[in-house]
């Protein structure tokens, strides 16, 4: 159960407190694409999220996209944002996160994973000792398997909240959004 506990929960990437991450010693971010910075399958990123990435970079954060998406999709967003990327990551496998760490040139204790899925982003990041940030998915449109995993995720998050292992208030918006 411990590997499923995110270090922070926010309604959106736009709400992620960069100053708090900096205080925690974080210098790099591994950021998911689908339903984290763009709705699943959408070819365009909202300008507010582009600005968030730019602001994070301006504040000195190194950023790398780590996505299970195909290389063409991942590369298009990486090029637009001028950051490196790991496509076809097969998260939660450790190799994708290790590749992201290598591209950032940072040790695990200085990197946070930002994503919308408990069983890929949070579980994978926690396995490597990364700080994990869970955000609400941007859309309910997803792959069939992801929809099934969302049901399991909802149950796991509810149980973690009942046990007092995650903030119920932060989780309330997430459980209400799915």
Image: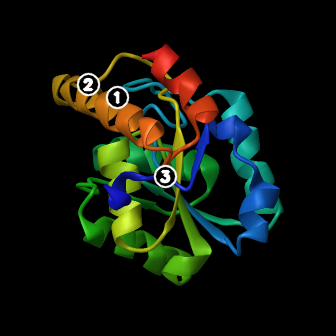
Q: Which of disc 3 and disc 2 is earlier in sequence?
A: 3
- Badge 2: how crowded within 10 Å, few (<14), some, or many (20+)? few
What residue sits 74% from the left and 43% below the top?
A: 52
What residue sits 55% from the left and 56% below the top?
A: 7
Separation of marks 2 and 3 at Cα, in angstroms: 17 Å
Quadrant for residue 116, please give it.
top left
- In the rendered image, is residue 105 in sight? yes
Where residue 49 appears, as percent x and y from the top left, is 67, 36
Question: Residue beneath label 1, please?
Answer: 154
Residue 38 to residue 54: above or below: above
Q: Which mark is residue 151?
A: 2
Secondary structure category for the residue under label 2: helix
- In the rendered image, is residue 68 in sight? no
**60 and 176: which one is in front?**
176
**153 and 97: which one is in front?**
153
Secondary structure category for the residue under label 3: loop
Separation of marks 1 and 3 at Cα, in angstroms: 14 Å
Where residue 133 appears, as percent x and y from the top left, is 55, 51
Separation of marks 1 and 2 at Cα, in angstroms: 5 Å
């Amino acid at each position: 159960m411990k590997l499923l506990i995110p270090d922070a929960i926010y309604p959106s990437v736009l709400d992620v407190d960069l100053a708090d991450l900096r205080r925690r010693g974080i210098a790099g971010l591994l950021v998911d694409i689908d339903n984290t910075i763009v709705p699943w399958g959408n070819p365009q990123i909202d300008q507010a999220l582009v600005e968030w990435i730019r602001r994070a970079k301006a504040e000195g954060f190194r950023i790398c996209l780590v996505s299970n998406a195909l290389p063409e999709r991942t590369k298009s967003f990486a090029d637009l944002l001028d950051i490196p990327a790991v496509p076809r990551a097969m998260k939660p496998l450790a190799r994708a996160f290790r590749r992201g760490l290598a591209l950032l040139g940072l040790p695990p204790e200085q990197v946070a994973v930002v994503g919308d899925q408990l069983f890929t982003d949070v579980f994978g990041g926690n396995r490597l000792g990364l700080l994990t940030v869970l955000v609400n998915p941007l859309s309910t449109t997803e792959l069939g398997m992801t929809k099934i995993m969302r049901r399991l995720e909802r149950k796991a998050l509810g149980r973690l909240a009942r046990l007092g292992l995650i903030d119920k208030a932060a989780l309330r918006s997430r459980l209400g959004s799915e």
